[in-house]
Image (cartoon, rainbow, N blue to C red):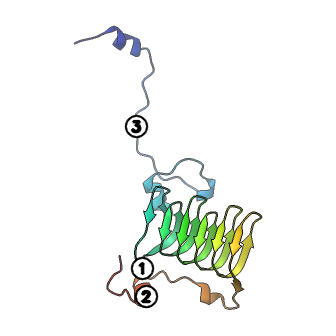
């Protein structure tokens, strides 16, 4: 109905492709170099505390049944099958997992079968593990204890069991 010189000039540009829903990437997470969608992260069992998020409160406990990646700040305890504290992430509290990778800051104890402190890690607390690796540049101020019984290090991921241990049986959020 109406047309202008601008409309005619824009018609020479190619049409953009239609927008379609992205499916979850296939393969291992380490094989992916593209950005993730919320659906793709959920499909891989990865929970993320982003760099714009701070979680704090009295007696806070975060429990992940799979992998938890912390890029933000947590003031409270963290339980997970695998916990990754990224360069910009920090946990002020205890960390319990089968595997813990630290590139950021932890102020509290770490209990895990395997613990890796990468070059940018800063840990102020004790570490109880089966294996511990400390990369050059990492800062660690605390005691390290290698346990003879790995079953002592298996994290408890049952929310009700954690709540009953900490005396919060009625508060499991």
> Callout 1: helix, strand or loop?
loop
Q: Residue 59 carries which label?
A: 1
Q: Mark 2 vs mark 1: which is more N-terminal?
A: 1
Asked if the residue at tag 1 contacts the one at tag 2, i.e. Cβ–Cβ closer than 8 Å, the answer is yes
Q: Which mark is residue 166?
A: 2
Q: Is residue 137 above or below residue 7?
A: below
Q: What residue lies at 51% left-to-right and 71% top-to-bottom? A: 66
Q: Distance between the residues labelled 2 and 3?
A: 48 Å
Q: How far apart are marks 2 and 1 (CA)?
A: 9 Å
Instruction: Give whichever of 142, 27 is nearer the camera.
Output: 142
Q: Which mark is residue 19?
A: 3
Q: Can residue 141 be seen in this view?
A: yes
Looking at the image, which residue sits at the far top? Answer: 5
Q: Is residue 9 above or below residue 85?
A: above
> Callout 2: helix, strand or loop?
helix
Within 10 Å of disc 1 (Cα), the crowding (few <14, some 14-19, many 20+) is few
Image quarter where the N terminus lies is top left
Q: What residue lies at 59% left-to-right and 61% top-to-bottom? A: 86
Instruction: Give whichever of 137, 32 is nearer the camera.
Output: 137
């Amino acid at each position: 109905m109406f047309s202008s010189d601008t409309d005619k000039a824009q018609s020479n540009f190619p049409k953009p492709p239609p927008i379609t829903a992205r499916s979850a990437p296939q393969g291992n997470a380490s094989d992916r170099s593209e950005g993730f969608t919320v659906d793709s992260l959920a499909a891989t069992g990865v929970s993320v505390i982003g760099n714009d998020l701070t979680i704090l409160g009295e007696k806070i406990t975060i429990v992940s049944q799979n992998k938890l990646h912390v890029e933000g700040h947590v003031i409270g305890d963290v339980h997970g099958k695998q916990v990754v504290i990224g360069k910009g992430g920090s946990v002020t509290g205890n960390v319990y997992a089968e595997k813990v990778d630290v590139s950021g800051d932890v102020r509290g104890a770490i209990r895990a079968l395997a613990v890796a402190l990468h070059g940018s890690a800063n840990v102020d607390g004790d570490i109880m593990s089966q294996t511990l690796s400390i990369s050059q540049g990492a800062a660690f101020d605390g005691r390290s204890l290698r346990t003879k019984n790995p079953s002592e290090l298996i994290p408890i991921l049952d929310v009700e069991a954690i709540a009953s241990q900490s005396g919060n049986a009625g508060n499991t959020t």
